[in-house]
Image (spheres, grey):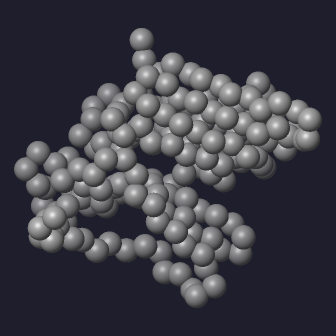
Amino acid sequence: FTGEVLWARKFLFEPLSPFHEFRVEFLGKYFADHVSLLDMSARSGTYEWSLWLIPAQAGARAEGAPLREPQRRPLLGRRLAHAVDEESGIFYYIADVPERRDRTLYSMNLNPARQNFKPVEIPLQQKYMPQNFNYTTCSLAADRDFITLVVSPPQPGSEYKIWVWKTSD
């Protein structure tokens, strides 16, 4: 450890009052040209989650870096769980949108240089996490080839469920 700072940036989050909850979590591998993080803010019991990609250099493109300014990508609905496939640079999350009776597994690209990213969108509400049961406690894991979802029982005496999807051929 040399203690040398390679780069530092500032960027604007939405202003918060002292009564708001706020959390930041770094995601994925650190890249020399950008960093990705998950931002959560709470206002009056409503949680808002966003994925941020922040470039090392403001305004001017670093050599080979595809990102100029910080990018904020809001997540849909209420985030129940998330996972990062660090090797592939993909962020996965489960969104719960109660007013639409919708639970879905989504993916987002963490690597702005990647071309032809095909996002994952798997509806969960019928087969995997039915809305009429209280399936709100779950965990997600991901690696290059698989996404795994573990769902807690909706009531005592029920079984845990584990679902695994293959992500590549």
User: What x and y, as percent, mark residue 84?
Assistant: 45, 42
- Left or right of residue 80: residue 72: left
Q: Quadrant of the C terminus?
A: top left
Residue plotted at (16% across, 64% down): 1
Residue 49 image-quadrant placement = bottom right
Q: In this view, does 2 lie above or below 38?
A: below
The residue nearer to you, when weighing 7 against 44, is 7
User: What x and y, as percent, mark residue 100?
Assistant: 76, 44
Residue plotted at (60% across, 75% down): 21
User: What x and y, as percent, mark residue 168?
Assistant: 42, 17
- Left or right of residue 131: residue 13: left
Q: Which residue reaches farthest bottom?
A: 18
User: What x and y, as percent, mark residue 106?
Assistant: 55, 37
Q: Can residue 59 be seen in this view?
A: no
Residue plotted at (53% across, 37% down): 141
Residue plotted at (84% across, 44% down): 134
The residue nearer to you, when weighing 88 against 50, is 88
Q: Can residue 93 be seen in this view?
A: yes
Q: Which residue reaches farthest front?
A: 1
- Left or right of residue 99: residue 118: left
